[in-house]
Amino acid sequence: MTYVIDRADLGRLASQVAGPVLAPGDADYPAETATWNETLVERPAVVVGATSTADVQAAVRFAAANDLPVAAVATGHGAVVASDGAVMVNLRRLKDIVVDTPTRSATIGGAVTAQPLIDAAFPEGLAPLAGSSPNVGVVGYALGGGLSATLGRTYGWAADHVRSADIVTPDGELRHIDAAHEPDLFWAIRGGKGNFGVVTSLDLDLVPMTELYGGGIYFAGEHVEPVLDAFRRLVAASPQELTLSFAFMRLPDQPDVPEPLRDRFTVHVRVAYLGPPAEGERLIADLRATAPALIDTVTEMPYTGIAAIHQDPLDPVPTYEVSALLSDFPADAEQALIDVAGPDADTPAGMIEIRQLGGALGRDPSVPNAVGNRDAGFQLFGGAFGTGPGLAEQFRAPLAAISGALAPWSTGHQQANFLTGYDLAPDAVARAYEPDTYHRLREVKRSYDPRNLFRINHNIPPET
Ligand SMILES: Cc1cc2nc3c(=O)[nH]c(=O)nc-3n(C[C@H](O)[C@H](O)[C@H](O)COP(=O)(O)OP(=O)(O)OC[C@H]3O[C@@H](n4cnc5c(N)ncnc54)[C@H](O)[C@@H]3O)c2cc1C
């Protein structure tokens, strides 16, 4: 949809906003609308580079007055819905971090990314429940559940550790919400993602943590079966302080890829253990003995280094994704995955991972929220990367073949943060929630966003 806003209206909006207000054709518009996931060309009617809560309010009020959808963007890691014709609110300047050591909490701006928060908490002996990537937005991550690849099995979902939020709702009002103030909205944003407004600030728990035993071991593709057998044995015996995942990697022949991994199929087993290093070493001895490692980085490490465990891509990249929650990952599932995505498979997927869930991720939080599907044992996630027209359609079937091969073990659900660009239909989004939760989310949506202005996302439509 092309929507051209009158220049005089833009001028009035710009007079209320301290940050940039840009429309198509403005020189800085492409940079201001750029997202980490580069699969879409973003063409909002206007982009507001918010520098404050007041800027966000002005942008949302402008959208409401003109009946335009709002696209909130922090980093663009989850940018899978085109923002054509929308008011894009770029939050990337909202980067304040205040760590409060006595209360073991942090108050963060709407676009703070994981690594700066980890770095700010570390000298205080504290840590956030960070995900695998250092530059994912903490707010977007926590609103979508927040699966920590290091601390989740011990402490639960990041959303379970949100204490309060400042949110600009679709009417342009700023609300401070917590378990006692607008509890329905507070319940909904923790799991319901960006459907209910723009969160300008979040107050969240930090946990005492500075060191762990972690890293990754890369094995050559020829060892895939014994390595995955060892992975499954280790999963079966793992305490909740141990979190494992593995990924099938097809890395390109590029200088920034370590030489042993270039242009070949490898299996990357990721390890995060919160107990004594000697015990961690004992736990993974069987895995290590399975096959020679191409690279083995598992060792004592500071929490500030956890990005090295998964080694997610840092630079923006066009990513077409697949995900599913699995109840189990038995031998038959292992074989099915090897057949469809293993060393001899013809697949465009550059990365396919299985993350271990369970432990505290399976428990209910002390303050209930909308994070669903806590019963899953594993998560499938992966993607194909590439630039060019028609790739979304080209990759659709091969990526669906991977989740299809694991369908016998699928719970039929997905986790909200891992819904993909192929999961935009309402029934696909609904798979991220239990039916009662989804129904209640739609009711809260009707209360706060009856016109569904916040629909440039994995949308939860208002109850009719
Ligand atoms: C490489 C990679 C690794 C990942 N690893 C993990 C992981 O380990 N665990 C996990 O749980 N997820 C993970 N994710 C998923 C990620 O958490 C989600 O995509 C998340 O929504 C990204 O938030 P963002 O702010 O970085 O991205 P954006 O694209 O800017 O935002 C994504 C969505 O969140 C909403 N949003 C963001 N900030 C705000 C805000 N301040 N107020 C209101 N809405 C907001 C946006 O409106 C948008 O709908 C990963 C994704 C990638 C690409």
Image (cartoon, grey):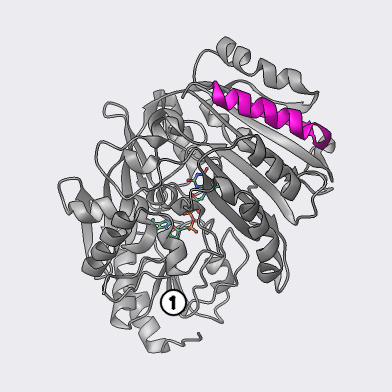
User: Looking at the image, can residue 89 be seen?
Assistant: no
- Does residue 227 show up magenta in the picture? yes
Q: Secondary structure at mark 1?
A: loop
- Whether ligand 1 has any atom under 8 Å from the Cβ at mark 1 is answered as no
Q: Which residues are magenta?
A: 215-237
**Residue 218 relative to residue 191: left or right:** right
- Per the picture, the main secondary structure of the magenta-coloured stretch is helix
Name the residue located 30 percent from the left edge and 37 percent from the top edge. 365
Name the residue located 22 percent from the left edge and 65 percent from the top edge. 173
Give the quarter of the image for residue 55: bottom left
- Does residue 65 show up magenta in the picture? no
Q: In the figure, 336 relative to 435: above or below?
A: above
User: Where the C terminus falls, by quadrant?
Assistant: bottom left
Residue 96: horizontal and vertical position, in percent?
38, 46
The residue labelled by disc 1 is 86
Disc 1 packing (10 Å; few <14; some 14–19; many ≥20): many
Q: In the figure, 191 relative to 72: above or below?
A: above
**Residue 403 relative to residue 140: left or right:** right
User: Looking at the image, can residue 417 be seen?
Assistant: yes
Q: Nearer the viewer, residue 351 or 1?
A: 351
